């Protein structure tokens, strides 16, 4: 899961969680993330995922886009990249992870250790 954090403009500070691809950013109503800053097109760019290759930002049509100050039509994204589209700056960020609870597996390991120890003690007492 990834996040797009708006760093400038009217929506500065808002974060959008990307749950599907392609994810469209623009000022139009059909955009997944609506950014109404000067210079932002209706469908300005999309974020796409390619299995085994990573995430890409792709400018739509003749829209201009820069990633970390370098312009391009299609750019591979890395964690923390700053994407400028028109008057807006958006940061590409990997989503926060949640750690699974490990209580049950840990409890089972301890029970297993106790059982092995109990069997060993029983066998030692039987061999005497």
Image (cartoon, rainbow, N blue to C red):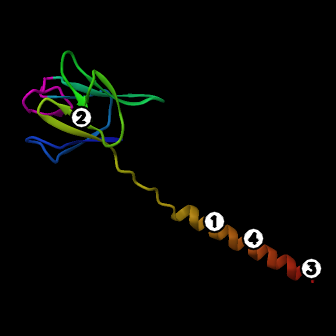
- Indicate whether residue 39 is drawn in magenta: yes
Which comes sooner in the sequence, label 4 or label 1?
Answer: 1
Of the image marks 1 and 3, the number of the one nearer the N terminus: 1
Kind of element beneath mark 1: helix
Q: Residues within 10 Å of mark 1 (few under 14, many from 20)?
A: few
User: Which of pointers 2 and 3 lies earlier in the amino acid sequence?
Assistant: 2
Kindly indicate whether the residue at mark 4 contacts the one at mark 2 (C-beta within 8 angstroms).
no
Q: Nearer the viewer, residue 104 or 74?
A: 74
Magenta span contains residue 93 = no
Query: Residue at image x 19%, y 16%?
Result: 62
Query: Mark 1 highlights which residue?
Result: 109
Residue shown at the point (33%, 29%) measured from the top left:
21
Check disc 2 and report the residue beneath it: 83
> Would you name the residue on which mark 3 appears?
127
Q: Residue furthest top?
A: 61
- The magenta-colored residue range is 27-42
- Compared with residue 111, is residue 16 higher up or lower down, i.e. above or below? above
Q: Residue at x 18, y 28 (%)?
A: 31
Report x, y in % for residue 20.
Answer: 32, 32
- Sequence-wise, the earlier of marks 1 and 2 is 2
- Distance between the alpha carbons at the discs numbered 1 and 2: 47 Å
Under circle 2, the secondary element is: strand
Find disc 4 in the rendering and name its residue. 116
Q: Is residue 107 above or below residue 21?
A: below
Quadrant position of the N terminus in the picture: top left
Tag nearer the camera, 2 or 4: 2
Q: Looking at the image, do the residues carrying marks 1 and 3 touch, with CB atoms under 8 Å apart?
A: no
Q: Is residue 125 left or right of residue 84?
A: right
Residue 12: x and y, percent?
A: 13, 45
- Helix, strand, or loop for circle 3? helix
User: Does dot 4 land on a helix, a strand or a loop?
Assistant: helix
Mark 2 touching mark 3, by CB under 8 A? Answer: no
């Amino acid at each position: 899961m990834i996040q797009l954090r708006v760093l400038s403009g009217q929506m500065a500070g808002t974060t959008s969680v990307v749950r599907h691809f392609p994810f469209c950013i623009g000022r139009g109503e059909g955009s997944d993330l609506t950014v109404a800053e000067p210079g932002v097109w209706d469908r300005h760019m999309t974020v796409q995922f390619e299995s085994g290759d990573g995430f890409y930002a792709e400018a739509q049509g003749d829209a201009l886009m820069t990633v970390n100050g370098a312009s391009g039509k299609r750019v591979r994204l890395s964690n923390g990249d700053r994407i400028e589209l028109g008057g807006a700056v958006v940061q590409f960020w990997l989503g926060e992870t949640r750690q699974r609870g490990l209580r049950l597996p840990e409890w089972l390991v301890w029970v297993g250790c106790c059982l092995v120890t109990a069997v060993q003690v029983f066998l030692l007492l039987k061999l005497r």
